[in-house]
Amino acid sequence: MASPRFLRPRWRGSNELNPSTMVTARHAELSVISSIDDLQPGSNGFLIELLLDAARAATLIDLSPLAGRCQTPEDRLFVETWPGEHYRLLPALAKTLQATSVVEVGTYLGQGTLALALGAEKVITYDIAAWTAFPSTVLLESDFETGIEQRIGDLSDPEYFDSQLDTLMAADLIFVDGPKDGTFERVFGTRLYEAIAGTGKVVIWDDIRLLSMVDIWRKFDVYKLDATSFGHWSGTGLTHSAE
Ligand SMILES: C[S@@+](CC[C@H](N)C(=O)[O-])C[C@H]1O[C@@H](n2cnc3c(N)ncnc32)[C@H](O)[C@@H]1O
């Protein structure tokens, strides 16, 4: 059985604005394009160098340990699509940063988790649902003996966030791929950036070009670079919490 993709076409509004009538594609979403010259802050040299190095490193990533776990040809195709999906860029960023410990928010089928584990020794992945709830998961029990840990909790809850602060502060790289519901990312992002200000940490955001994410992404008060051309078609953003 094909696993449900998280980004399903889900247009419910008037036909005039239905993205699937505007473009011929497997999946289309409405978005907004907006100027970069007034982004405050915009990018910095560190993020540009990081993306250039990681994009090159991504060409050398062997995704077969992850692709081989996919239960359907459709899932395998998604995982192997690059650029367009983020499964090469994630381990490439971890390797380029020489990350030991990585945090992921949003486990789902574990595809991002396994990809990150190709680039770092330890991956702590958060979700509000256990990985075992998804029959099409690529994760195996044995993964949890070799550097992967799942924690169940909502990081937009201030008490839970505080209880996980040590783990977030210890992470060399944080990948945020949660609900994109217009609230979680704003609330979690605001608290996260307050905590990691000036630490030099890099955060990867998925789906920054979705309508629910465009303004949240723009308003993060941190150096930022849109890395979509080497990541996920729905938007991949990198931030750097430097002084
Ligand atoms: C797009 S999927 C993650 C995909 C995965 N990171 C990948 O790259 O393959 C989003 C996941 O976020 C989870 N989620 C929803 N709300 C959450 C929250 N408040 N905290 C953490 N995870 C959440 C959902 O249960 C779902 O499994």
Image (cartoon, helix red, strand yellow):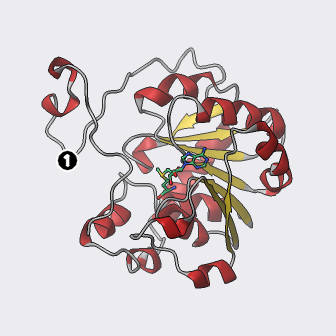
Image: 49 above or below 120: above
Query: Element under label 1?
Result: loop
* Residue 139 x %, y %: 51, 75
Is 82 displayed left or right of 97 in the figure? left
Can I make out residue 57 in this image?
Answer: yes
Question: In the image, what residue occupies the spot 51% across and 21% down?
Answer: 36
Q: Which residue is mark 1?
A: 26
Q: Say which quarter of the image contains residue 184.
A: top right
* Residue 58 x %, y %: 48, 63
Q: If the image is split into quadrants, where does the C terminus sit?
A: top right
Question: In the image, what residue occupies the spot 35% across and 66% down?
Answer: 80
Q: Using the image as rendered, state which of residue 32 and residue 161 is in the foreground.
A: 161
Q: If the image is split into quadrants, where does the N terminus sit?
A: bottom left
Is 113 displayed left or right of 27 in the figure? right
Question: In the image, what residue occupies the spot 39% across and 50% down?
Answer: 6
Is 161 displayed left or right of 217 in the figure? right
Q: Is mark 1 within 8 Å of ligand 1?
A: no
Question: In the image, what residue occupies the spot 65% across and 78% down?
Answer: 144
Dot 1: within a 10 Å radius of its alpha carbon, few (fewer than 14), some, or many (20 or more) residues? few
Is 29 displayed left or right of 134 in the figure? left
Can I make out residue 110 in this image?
Answer: no
Q: Amino acid at mark 1?
A: Arg
* Residue 90 x %, y %: 54, 59
Image: 13 above or below 226: above
Q: Say which quarter of the image contains residue 188.
A: top right
Q: Say which quarter of the image contains residue 156.
A: top right
* Residue 11 x %, y %: 26, 31
Image: 128 above or below 189: below
